[in-house]
Amino acid sequence: MATVTGAGTSMSDAPAEAPLERVMVIYAHPDDPEFFSGGLLARFAADGKEIIYVLATSGDKGTDDPDITPQQLASMREAEQRAAAKCLNVETVVFLRYPDGELMPTLGLRRDLTRLIRQFKPDIVVTNDPQTYITRMGSINHPDHRAIGDATLSAIYPTARDRHNMVELWRDEGLEPHKVRRVYLSGTLNPNMRLIISDVLETKITAILEHRSQIKDREALIKRMRESLDTEFDDQPLYTESYRVLNLK
Ligand SMILES: [Zn+2]
C-alpha cells in the first residue's frame, strides 16, 4: 500500500496531465465528510483546491431526543455542516434533502448526482466504498453510506461521462458529459493508499466539533481522536486515513 503525505500531486501514479484542481465530496449525512475524510480534505484545502460538498440527506434521524422534529434537526444539522465546511475552506455545500436512513441507489439519486457532476465538473470525487457491509471495527456500516457510494460510482461512470446516458440531462438541460479523473473511497476494507494526516489532525478535530448535535462528550471525542494513532507505525506516532483510490482512464 502506498503511504503518502500529500493528497494531490505527490502521488507517484498521478498522471502528468493538468493538475487535479476541483474536488466534489459526496456523502450521505452531515458530519460524514469530516469524520471519514477530514484529514484528506484539510490537505486538499491547504493545496488550494476548490472543494464542493454534496450531502444526500440532512441527517434528520440523528438524535435520541423525542422532542425534536425531523425538520428542526435537519436545519440544525445543515447549519452545523456549513460551519464545519468553513473550517476546511469549503465554500459550496449542496443538500439534496433525501430522507435520512432510507437512502437507496436509485436512478433518481444517480440523476441528481450526475447533474451536479456535470455542472461543477470535479476532477476528483470523494465518497464511501459501497462494498463495506461490515466495517473494519466489526460494526454494521450504515446502509446510507453504501447507497451513496453505489449511486456516486454509477453517476461517475457511465452516466456523467457518456453522452447518451440519461440523455435528457444533455438534451434538455444542456449539461455536457464530464469525466472524473480520480476517486477516493473512504471506509474501505481494501485500501491502496494511506495518507498521513498528523499535521492536519487538529484542523480535522476542529471541523468535527462543529457537529454539536452529534457529540455528547466533546472532551472524550478529542481524547479519542488524539489517541487514534496508526499502530502499524511503531517507531513514530502518526495519524492516518486510508482510501481505495481509483485513477480513471
Ligand atoms: Zn453517516
Image (cartoon, rainbow, N blue to C red):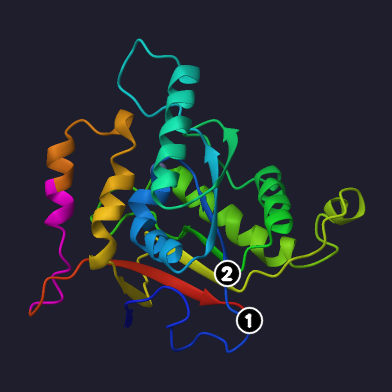
Residue range in magenta is 223-234
| Disc marking residue 21 | 2
Q: Is residue 143 magenta?
A: no
Left or right of 103 on screen, residue 136? left
Q: Which residue is mark 1?
A: 18
Q: Residue at x 7, y 80 (%)?
A: 235
Amino acid type of disc 1?
Answer: Ala
Q: Is residue 231 magenta?
A: yes
Q: Residue at x 51, y 85 (%)?
A: 14
Left or right of 234 on screen, residue 130? right
Between 219 and 138, the residue placed more toward the observer is 219
Left or right of 126 on screen, residue 180? right
Q: Indicate yes or no: mark 2 CB to ligand 1 under 8 Å.
A: no
Q: How many numbered marks are there? A: 2
Q: Note whether residue 232 is visible.
A: yes
Residue 159: quarter of image: bottom right
Q: Relative to residue 66, is residue 111 depicted above or below?
A: below
Query: In which quadrant will I find the C terminus?
Result: bottom right
Provide residue 214's location: percent of width, then percent of height: 30, 33
Q: Note whether residue 59 is visible.
A: no
